[in-house]
Image (tube, grey):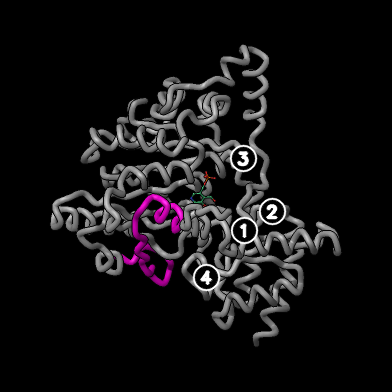
Amino acid sequence: MSIKVNDQVYQFGVEPSVIREIFAFGLERAQVVGPENVLDFSLGNPSVPAPKIVQDTVKAIIDNQQPKDYHSYTPGPGAPATRKAIADNLNKRFGMNYGPEDLYMTCGAAASLNIVLKTLIAEPTDEIAVIIPFFPEYTAFIHAQGGKQVLVEPTEELTIDVDNLRAAITPNTKAVIFNTPNNPSGVIYPEANIKAACEMLKEKSEEYGHPIFIIADEPYRELVYTDEKVAYIPTIYPNTIVCYSWSKSLSLAGERIGYIAISKEAEGYDVIMPAINGAGRALGYVCAPSLFQQVVRECVDCEADLTQYKINRDLLYNALVEYGYNVAKPSGAFYMYIEAPDKDAEAFCKKAMEHDMLLVPGTGFGTPSYMRLSYCVEQAKVEKCLPVFKKLMEEYK
Ligand code: PLP
C-alpha cells in the first residue's frame, strides 16, 4: 500500500540540513577524540544557564500553587496577567501604548513567525521580502504558510540596502522581515538605516494602496555588546508586528515561550488581531506553555547575563582580525560571521573540520563566502580554536 503525504513538508523533512550533518559529525568525533576536543560552534543553543531567578520562580510556583494552576490551559492568546506584565514592560521601555489585548503568547519566535505569516499571506502570489543574510528557517516558514520568499542583497556592512529593498517590493509584497541583532551576522541595523527603509516602505505602501508590514523578528533584542541602539521598530513604523521569544535572552530555548505584539495604530489591526488568534488556533499554537507564561510574567524585568558571551566575542574578534580575517561587526546576538579568505566558505569549513572545528558555511544564510561561528560555548573552546584559525589563515597566505 502506498501513502501520499504532503510533498512540501516531506521535502522539508528529508532535505539535507548542513547544520544537522555538522552536528552529527561532531557527535561521532566526540566518541573518538573526546567531547572537550570537538570545537563545535555550529548551534545557537545558549550556553549561559537561565538566571537563578527563573529556577527560583519555577520552584515558588510549584511550591505555592495547585498543579491545576500551572499545568492547565490558559485562554488561547495567553494569561491576561502575563500579557499585561509584558505590555507594561514594553510601554515603559519603548514608550508604547500596548494593552494586554495587543499581545498573543506563543511557543517561541518560530511559532510567532508562522502565525504572523499565516495571518498576512492571503494569496499564493503574496510575497515576503527577506534581507540577506537570514535565518534559513524563514524559507520553510514562508513556503509552509503559502507565500513566496523574495531575497534582498544587503549592503557591504550586511545592513539593509534600501535601494535593493525598494527594487524588491512589488504590488504583491505583504511584508518584510527584519531581524536585528541578526542571525547569522550579529549585525545591528543602525536606526538611521531602519528609518530610511521605513520611509521607503511608507511610500511604497501608498503607491500600491495597501500596507506593507514589517515583521520584526527579535529573539536577540537583549543580546547587545556595544552602545548601539536596537531600534524599536513600531515606534518608527506603526505597521510592524513584533515576534519575540525568551529562547536566547533568558536561555529558555527548550521551554518554547514568546509572544506577538501589534499596536492598535497598525492599519488593519481590527482584522489582524482576530486573524492572529485564528492562525494560532489553526496551527495548534493556542495556549503557550502555562508554567512558563507565569515564569516570564515574574521575570519580565530580568536582564540577560551577557558576561561570558562578551568575553568570547572579544577574544574571537580581536584574534581573528589580528590573523587577517574579515569579520562582520559583531555587535549583538552570539554569532560571528567570518569571510573565508578565498571567499569559499564551504571549502574553509571542510578544512576546519579536519581540525575538529565545526562552523556553518553561509550558503543557507544567503552568503556563500561567509561562515557562521556560534560563540555561545565554554570559553575553553574559544581559546582552543584560536590557534586553528591562525594555522588555517597561514595556509591561505
Ligand atoms: N528567529 C531567529 C532569527 C532565530 O535565530 C531563531 C532561533 O534560533 C528563531 C527565530 C526561533 O526562535 P525560537 O527558538 O524562540 O522559536
Q: Is the residue indicated by label 2 positioned so its CB lies within 8 Å of ligand 1?
A: no
* Contact between labelled residues 3 and 2, with CB atoms less than 8 Å apart: no
Residue type, mark 2 in image: Val
Q: Nearer the viewer, mark 4 or mark 1?
A: 4
Q: Quadrant of residue 342?
A: bottom right
* Contact between labelled residues 1 and 2, with CB atoms less than 8 Å apart: yes
The spot of residue 278 in percent (x, y) is 35, 34
How many marks the image carries: the answer is 4
Is 208 left, or right, of 67 in this rendering?
left
Residue hosting label 4: 363
Work out whether residue 234 can be spotted: yes
Which element carries disc 1, helix, strand or loop? strand
Q: Nearer the viewer, mark 2 or mark 4?
A: 4
Numbered label attached to residue 377: 2
Q: CA distance from mark 2 to mark 4?
A: 23 Å
Disc 2 packing (10 Å; few <14; some 14–19; many ≥20):
many
